[in-house]
Amino acid sequence: MLRVLALYPDLMNIYADRGNLTVFERRATWRGIGFELAGAGIGDEIDPDAHDLVYIGGGQDRDQALCARDLATVKRDALHAAAARGAVVFAVCGGLQLLGHGYEMEGERLPGVGLVDLDTRREDGPRLLGSIAISLDLPGGPARLAGFENHAGRTYLGSGTEPLGRVLRGNGNNGADGTEGVRGGPHGTVIGTYMHGPLLPKNTAFADWLVATAMGVDALPPLDDALEAAAHAEAARAAGV
Ligand code: GLN
């Protein structure tokens, strides 16, 4: 059984990030694994033991501002407890920005939930926008993710904090240091990325790794991923790798 909790599914959901949840559901169902999806909005308490994977999608600054304080207060302890027992917390873009210490915007600093050592700020300069490809290590060996990014905030990892991967093409965390996303927390299960799109239909090995990690298993039975592989190849081609 895979138990997924989507945080702020109505507010933190742009660029079809909700499609990532469909990938979790379909790939579990195709394998005969039970699937449960819950949602939690502003003001809702969450049970740290009730979910294997907590998902936070992307959001525009104004939507993030609505969620940030709730995430950092109402949900903070439960999310730390979930990460401490090895649950996966997977956050995309605006969600990634809220995983760390905070997000410095013009005239306002949004609090983060403090699951990983990173900070995000607006800086002069263009939005970091376009196709992106990164390299990372998965249990099966070196892998590559391809997708799309669009963010104004720049994220900087604290020293000793690991990125999810290294930028091959595109901008990643800040357009300068070659890092993309984050992988941290007590068990390395707090994972964030700037890649939207939705990301997971185009990168199924990564989706499966998230699910296997959430379920505490080494690997999942293979599926016929011919269409998904074609989508991945197209995203990689768009990124120029
Ligand atoms: N609001 C954030 C930014 O612009 C993230 C946007 C997003 O999730 N695409 O930096």
Image: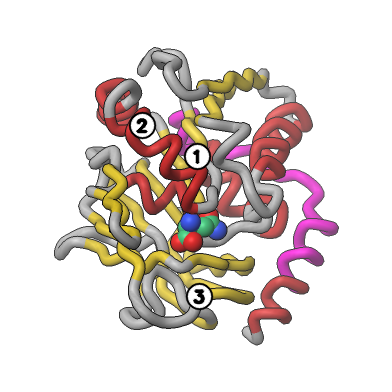
Residue at the limit of the structure toward the front, as seen here? 107
What residue do we see at 63% from left, 18% from top? Answer: 36
- Give the residue type at disc 3: Leu
* Residue 228 percent across, percent down from the top left: 77, 57
Q: Residue furthest left?
A: 159
Which label lies toward us, 2 or 1? 2
The amino acid type, in three-letter code, at marker 2 is Leu
How far separated are the C-alphas under marks 2 and 1?
A: 10 Å
Location of mark 3 (residue): 128
| Label 2 vs 1, first from the N-terminus | 1
How crowded pointer 3 is (Cα within 10 Å; few <14, some 14-19, many 20+) is rated as some
Q: Amino acid at mark 1?
A: Ile
Residue 99 highlighted magenta (yes or no): no
Left or right, 181 with respect to 85, comes to right
Q: Which of the labelled discs sits on residue 56, or is there none?
A: 1
Position of 189 relative to 142 (above/below) = above
Question: Which comes before the other along the chain, label 1 or label 3?
Answer: 1
Q: Is residue 140 visible?
A: no
Asked if the residues shown at circle 2 and circle 1 are in contact, with their CB atoms under 8 angstroms apart, the answer is yes
Q: Residue at x 50, y 75 (%)?
A: 128
Q: Are marks 3 and 2 in contact (CB under 8 Å)?
A: no
Q: Secondary structure at mark 2?
A: helix
- If the image is split into quadrants, where does the C terminus sit? bottom right
